[in-house]
Image (spheres, helix red, strand yellow):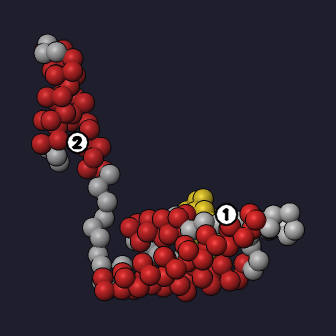
Amino acid sequence: MLPYPILATCLLIMWLLLNGFTLGHFILGLIVAVFAGWAMASLQPEPIRLKKWYLLPKLFGLVFRDIVKSNIDVAWIILRSGKRRHNPGFITINLELRSQFALAVLAVILTSTPGSAWLEYDSNDHSVLLHVLDIQNEAVWRDTIKNRYEALLLEIFA
């Protein structure tokens, strides 16, 4: 009946401690606790399957290197903003990743890299919309994300 009985019990106790013990508060707290337990059960993520966990250091190294390089590139754009115009824009990239956890890792990678931001994921056509501070060549961005990050994530989380 209750997927998380300890959570429901703790919520009921907290409800009663905050509101005082009356029959009305007990019934209302019980209803809230039961529905909160059901809501938590629906939010439970899929289990993480690391097929090739030994590739994680390689991924961390690539991401660290790209973040440092991107910081330098963004600083250079800011320092030279009067002399050269940067070309911001949006890119849509179709992905093969289906794992929610792998998609979340890719979102963190792309958003934590200065100069790019993950804006939207369309689960119908499995595409991501990115904002890029300086698009010099869209093909290079697609190639970097598909062959550098997504391919490695597909190996790790397959």
Q: In this view, does 67 lie above or below 36?
A: below
Residue, x 68% and y 73% (percent of image)? Answer: 73
Image point 65% across, 66% down: which residue?
A: 115
How many angstroms separate mark 2 from mark 1 (CA)? Answer: 37 Å
Q: Is residue 91 visible?
A: no
Front label number (2 vs 1) = 1
Q: Position of residue 129 (x, y in %)?
A: 63, 65
Left or right of 133, for residue 112? left
Instruction: Answer with left or right where residue 139 lies relative to residue 100.
Output: right
> Label 2: how many residues lie within 10 Å, few (<14), some (14-19) or many (20+)?
many
Q: Which amino acid is tagged 2?
A: Gly
Name the image quarter holding residue 79. bottom right
- Pick the front one: 50 or 56: 56
Q: Quick check: 152 above or below 46? A: below
Identify the secondary structure beneath mark 2: helix
Res 111 label: none
> Is 149 placed left or right of 139 in the picture?
left
Instruction: Name, please, the residue furthest toward the right.
Output: 83
Residue 119 x %, y %? 60, 59
Residue carrying label 1 = 131
